[in-house]
Image (cartoon, rainbow, N blue to C red):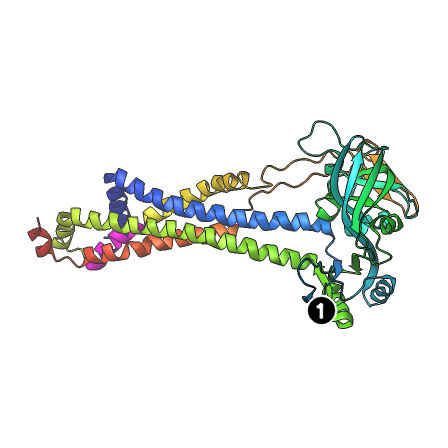
Amino acid sequence: MNVKEIFGLSLGAIKERKVRSALTILMVLVGSSLLVAVNAFGAGFSDFFNKQFANLAPNILFVSSVQQDQDDGGGGIGSVAPPPSAKITLNAAVESRIRSLPFVSQVIPSYQGEISIQSGSESKSFSVLSMDPSQLFVISPTLELMEGSTLPSANDPTAILVAEDIASPPGESTPFINLGQSVRLSYSFVDPDTGEAKEESKSFVVRGIIESTGNPTVDNAVVIGLQPGDDLLQRAGKYDSLFVAASSTDYVDVVEEEIRTLYGNDIGITTVQNILKTIEEFTGGINAFLASIAIISLVVGAVGIITTLYTSVVERIREIGTLKAIGAKNTTILGLFLFEALLIGIMGASSGLVAGIGMGYLLVSASPGGGGEENAAGENITDTGSDTSVTSDSEQTGEQEQESEPLTPVYLGEDMLRVWFISVGLSVMAGLYPAWKASRYLPVDALRAL
């Protein structure tokens, strides 16, 4: 009996038991489609975060102070311990020293804090980022301002830039802040000398509204100049953080090592690469968990194949005995049932790849960021050094309107091929025992069992 005849008999056996075979194929389909969807979801998730964190400028290092451990001074009941002090004070001297390191192109000092913004009769709390506004393009290369906005100079004491989500909070029908409006910023603090609660307030004029960039440092804050921020936040020249720009992404690790050599662990350093690595480890754990569920589904499908084929062996004892009586070898009977398992695996795995594509989109649509929203873009900002202008897309032909990339599944050919071979391989392995059992029947035993 040749391979073609064995194939025909196996296919005929599957057709004779349509319902049982269909259910077994369905089990293989579910496992393989789930594995395809999980792989596509994981690849899409990684691609999504790589695109999002590209907005953070991969050559930037975020340098901050490390707080000293606060020991209990035994001040007694009711005593209030002073706030912990920084091990290293980030000031102009530290800025200058880091700037002198090799492969450092820029060092951008900043103050940060929580402030209250009063716009008209309404007041809300937000983060404030105090730095040279012209340096925003260094930490957020994709930054754009809405039409009519201007980028204030570093020495403008009353100018403020507002993030789009702050100016027009999502879900609210009316904007909180309008372009050209005067707002009042208030900062509450405790006087370190007297221990009294105080508040510093200052009025600003909204010179520009920043479109969403995907950079949380910019998208969740209002931006004011460095000196106005120092005055408002009462920092006395002590920076909250330094944005250190390496001359190339290739030198980020080198710059980090040089800073560590100077200050050791008394200074905190975060890089975009470290953030991405952490996210990849997190998403990798989730994907491994989901993939294990998919593998279990495939194993369940394999158990279904064992059950189906073993039942088929019992039901087809007369056929096995007849084939043995007319001279069929053990290998022929073995091949007959293995071909049946192979066909079930091929049909289940192939249809599972198609179903997995649809399931991948379902997984993505149910996840945060799966819908994707377009930015209300329409303007482009051009920084020309001393002059900065904002122009609309209609004035710059050939440039594409920037959109926030939605989370979409990514189907890799090698992943889908791997899933297909795993599914088919498990199916064939599941058919080994029933096939071996059938091949061991003697003709006399097979006919006597009837």
* Secondary structure category for the residue under label 1: helix
How many other residues sit within 10 Å of disc 1, few (<14), some (14-19) or many (≥20)?
A: some
Q: Quadrant of residue 23?
A: top left
349 drawn magenta: no
Apparent side of residue 70 relative to residue 156 in the rendered image (left or right): left
Disc 1: which residue: 265
Considering depth in this image, is 89 or 46 the residue closer to the camera? 89
Apparent side of residue 370 relative to residue 424 in the rendered image (left or right): right
Residue beneath the point at 85% across and 32% down:
181
Residue 236 percent across, percent down from the top left:
87, 56
Q: Is residue 183 above or below residue 346?
A: above
Residue 42 percent across, percent down from the top left:
54, 50
Q: Is residue 255 above or below residue 361?
A: below
Residue beneath the point at 24% across and 46% down:
9
Residue extent of the magenta highlight? 330-342
Three-letter code, disc 1 = Asn
331 drawn magenta: yes
Judged from this view, the residue extending furthest toward the left is 448
Considering depth in this image, is 196 or 239 the residue closer to the camera? 196
Judged from this view, the residue extending furthest toward the top is 173
Q: Judge whether residue 278 can be spotted in this image.
A: yes
Considering depth in this image, is 366 or 270 the residue closer to the camera? 270
Q: Main secondary structure of the magenta part?
A: helix
Apparent side of residue 412 relative to residue 95 in the rendered image (left or right): left
Q: Judge whether residue 400 can be spotted in this image.
A: no
Residue 144 percent across, percent down from the top left:
79, 41
